[in-house]
């Protein structure tokens, strides 16, 4: 991974830059991707504002927020982000994009708007995205790829599949692929193949001893994540924490 430091997961190309601000399965996940026009946030885990400020990143530079899915460790910081942007008097509209049917994200936005019906100084644009749809934010072309992801609760069976996406973010000939949380599914190959950087979640250290259904429906192991990552020119494994 270019310009990689032991304490910061970061990558810099000619036209795109990425920084994984925090990533631990079951705690929080958020990634900052920017070009010369501004940044998009991929997910907003708990502690987002702290992590932005401690990494000298300007929340005012956020041009849009994109969600991979609605689990708490990916959306827990959304309300705080909206509140912070309201506090600093943001004027620029804020696109918020999430998979079609991702009720958690849009419920949080709706509740925020209900709490402050007359004092939000910026407009919030909500966009439900479907697989293979393409949007543009800050000059970046963002394409959605449906991935397989189910929830789980310790001591219980795997829950039903939820709306979940990975994204390819492209700008001036460079591409960053973000897997989101997912099991080992065919769409991951298309998502990562040929990207300059693939950011791949790897919840389990090894696939040995992990039930196959878990690896196909909930989280990847490091060995499976590396298999996907090698389809890109460079990759980084994130969202570790389970089975370590």
Image (cartoon, rainbow, N blue to C red):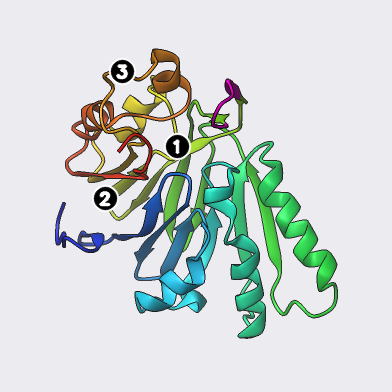
Give how far across and how far down residue 124 sits, in percent: 69, 64
Q: Earlier in the sequence, mark 2 or mark 3?
A: 2
Give how far across and how far down residue 155 sits, in percent: 56, 26
Asked which secondary structure carries label 2, the reply is loop
Give how far across and how far down residue 161 sits, in percent: 59, 24
Dominant SS type (magenta): loop
Asked which secondary structure carries label 1, the reply is loop
Residue closest to the far top: 212
Indicate which label's residue lies in the foreground, 1 or 3.
3
Q: Tag on residue 209?
A: 3
Asked which secondary structure carries label 3, the reply is loop
Relative depth, front residue between 217 and 196 = 217
Give the residues drawn in magenta, as a range: 153-159
Q: CA distance from mark 2 to mark 3?
A: 41 Å
Q: Are marks 2 and 3 in contact (CB under 8 Å)?
A: no
**Does the magenta portion include 133?**
no
Q: Earlier in the sequence, mark 1 or mark 3?
A: 1
- Determine which residue is flagged by label 2: 173
Question: Is 121 on the left or on the right of 131, as rendered?
Answer: right
Q: How many marks?
A: 3
Badge 1: residue crowd in 10 Å (few <14, some 14–19, many ≥20): many
- Determine which residue is flagged by label 1: 181
Give how far across and how far down residue 3 sits, in percent: 14, 62
Badge 3: residue crowd in 10 Å (few <14, some 14–19, many ≥20): few
The relative height of residue 121 versus residue 2 in the rendered view (above or below) is below
Q: CA distance from mark 1 to mark 3?
A: 20 Å
> Residue visible at 48% across and 29% down?
147
């Amino acid at each position: 991974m270019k310009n990689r430091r032991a304490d910061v997961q970061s990558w810099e190309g000619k036209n795109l830059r990425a920084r994984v601000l925090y990533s631990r399965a079951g705690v929080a996940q958020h990634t900052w991707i920017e070009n010369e026009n501004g940044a998009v946030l991929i997910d907003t885990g708990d502690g987002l504002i702290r992590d932005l400020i401690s990494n000298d990143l300007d929340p005012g530079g956020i041009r849009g927020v994109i969600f991979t899915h609605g689990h708490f460790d990916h959306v827990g910081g959304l309300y705080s982000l909206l509140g912070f942007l309201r506090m600093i008097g943001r004027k620029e509209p804020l696109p918020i994009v999430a998979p079609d049917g991702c009720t958690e994200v849009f419920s949080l936005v709706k509740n925020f708007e209900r709490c402050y019906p007359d004092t939000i100084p910026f407009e919030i644009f909500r966009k439900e995205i479907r697989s293979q749809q393409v949007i543009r934010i800050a000059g970046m072309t963002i394409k959605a790829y449906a991935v397989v992801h189910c929830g789980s609760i310790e001591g219980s069976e795997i829950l039903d599949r939820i709306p979940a996406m990975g994204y390819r973010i492209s700008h001036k000939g460079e591409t960053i692929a973000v897997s989101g949380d997912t099991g080992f599914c065919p769409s991951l190959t298309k998502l990562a193949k040929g990207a300059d950087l693939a950011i791949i979640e790897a919840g389990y250290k090894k696939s040995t001893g992990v039930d196959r259904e878990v690896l196909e429906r909930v989280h990847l192991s490091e060995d499976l994540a590396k298999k996907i990552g090698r389809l890109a020119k460079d990759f980084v494994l994130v969202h570790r924490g389970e089975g370590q």
